[in-house]
């Protein structure tokens, strides 16, 4: 078998090409008890939010927009829950770059408001739980549903998150500079060929991006879990260009 052939086998079950936001996913109830155990922090670049053991051998960098239904699908019924298990096992660490391009594309401010609220949740040590809750209760993509009132209502379901400081950060868009910088980081990730950004969700594992034509494996829960396990067991053989 040629180098990288095992990755092609893993992708055989994921033949649907995923090109971006568009479909809805079934609901998934966040596991707050487990999520609260995960360490979270802001990276040195000021935009990357990292979750999990920084010494874990598998690093999964995700590019997401809170309004993107495909991101919800990944986080609720796709590979996201299996990634969460890998984080708890200290087998992987997740990094998030939060985009907000759908506001400009669809109109509104929901993505920006949600990214600001997620940054405020990180300040309170509640990013993981709140991130899961926002995707589990994501409004329709075409509806600018992440209003201040809705974001605060959802925050009330995360124990210890609501406070005068958090509420004011949400209402005043305290982290608007972070929102703008995160969108810029997302766009830079697309490089010359994709100046508007690589699309959401995009995953870069141990520095190697999963190509667009294999994006469907992000939505195949068990296929994605096997991919993470293979990379964990044989990191030197992971080559996304030979999936």
Image (cartoon, rainbow, N blue to C red):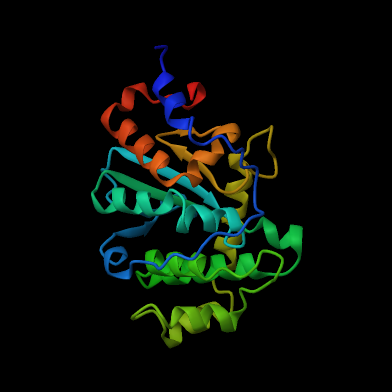
**Which sits in the foreground, 118 or 143?**
143
Q: Position of residue 221 (x, y in %)?
A: 42, 46
Counting from the top left corner in percent of width and height, residue 120 is at: 46, 71
Residue drawn at point x = 58 percent, y = 53 percent: 70
Q: Nearer the viewer, residue 224 or 34?
A: 224
Rendered image quadrant of residue 17: top right
Is residue 243 shown above or below 77? Answer: above
Task: Give 56 or 81, whichever is nearer the viewer.
Answer: 81
Please indicate, yes or no, whether residue 206 appears anywhere in the rendered image: yes
Q: Please identify the residue farthest to the bottom as the structure is shown.
A: 164
Query: In the image, is residue 74 above or below residue 179?
Result: above
Most extreme residue toward the front is 13
Residue 174, picture quadrant: bottom right
Relative to 111, residue 194 above or below: above
Q: Quadrant of residue 143?
A: bottom right
**Is 92 placed left or right of 22 in the picture?**
left
| Residue 190 spot, x, y in % from top left | 62, 39
Report the side of 227 relative to 188 (left or right).
left
Indicate the quadrant containing the N terminus: top left, top right, bottom left or bottom right. top left
**x, y (%) of residue 165?**
44, 83
Identified at 55% across, 54% down, the residue is 71
Residue at 57% x, 61% y is 66
The answer, for residue 175, to whether it is visible in the render is no
Seen from the viewer's position, the closer of residues 183 and 198 is 198
Q: Residue at coordinates 36% horizontally, 58% vertically from top-left?
A: 41
Task: State the count of labels.
Answer: 0
């Amino acid at each position: 078998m040629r180098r990288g052939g095992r990755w092609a086998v893993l992708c055989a079950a994921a033949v649907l090409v995923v090109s971006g936001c568009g479909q809805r996913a079934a609901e998934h109830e966040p596991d707050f008890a487990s999520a609260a155990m995960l360490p979270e922090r802001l990276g040195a670049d000021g935009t990357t939010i990292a979750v999990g053991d920084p010494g874990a051998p598998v690093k999964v960098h995700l590019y997401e927009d809170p309004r993107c239904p495909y991101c919800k699908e990944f986080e609720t019924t796709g590979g996201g829950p299996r990634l969460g298990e890998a984080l708890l096992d200290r087998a992987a660490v997740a990094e998030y770059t939060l985009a907000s391009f759908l506001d400009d594309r669809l109109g509104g401010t929901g993505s920006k408001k949600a990214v600001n609220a997620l940054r405020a949740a990180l300040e309170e040590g509640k990013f993981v739980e709140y991130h899961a809750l926002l995707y589990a209760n994501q409004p329709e993509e075409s509806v600018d549903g992440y209003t201040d009132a809705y974001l605060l209502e959802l925050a009330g379901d995360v124990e210890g998150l609501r406070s005068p400081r958090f509420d004011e950060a949400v209402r005043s868009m305290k982290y608007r500079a972070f929102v703008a910088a995160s969108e810029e980081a997302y766009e830079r990730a697309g490089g010359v060929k994709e100046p508007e950004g690589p699309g959401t969700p995009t995953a870069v594992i141990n520095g190697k991006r999963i190509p667009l034509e294999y994006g469907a494996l992000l939505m195949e829960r068990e296929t994605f879990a096997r991919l993470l396990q293979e990379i964990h067991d044989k990191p030197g053989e992971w080559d996304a260009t030979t999936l």
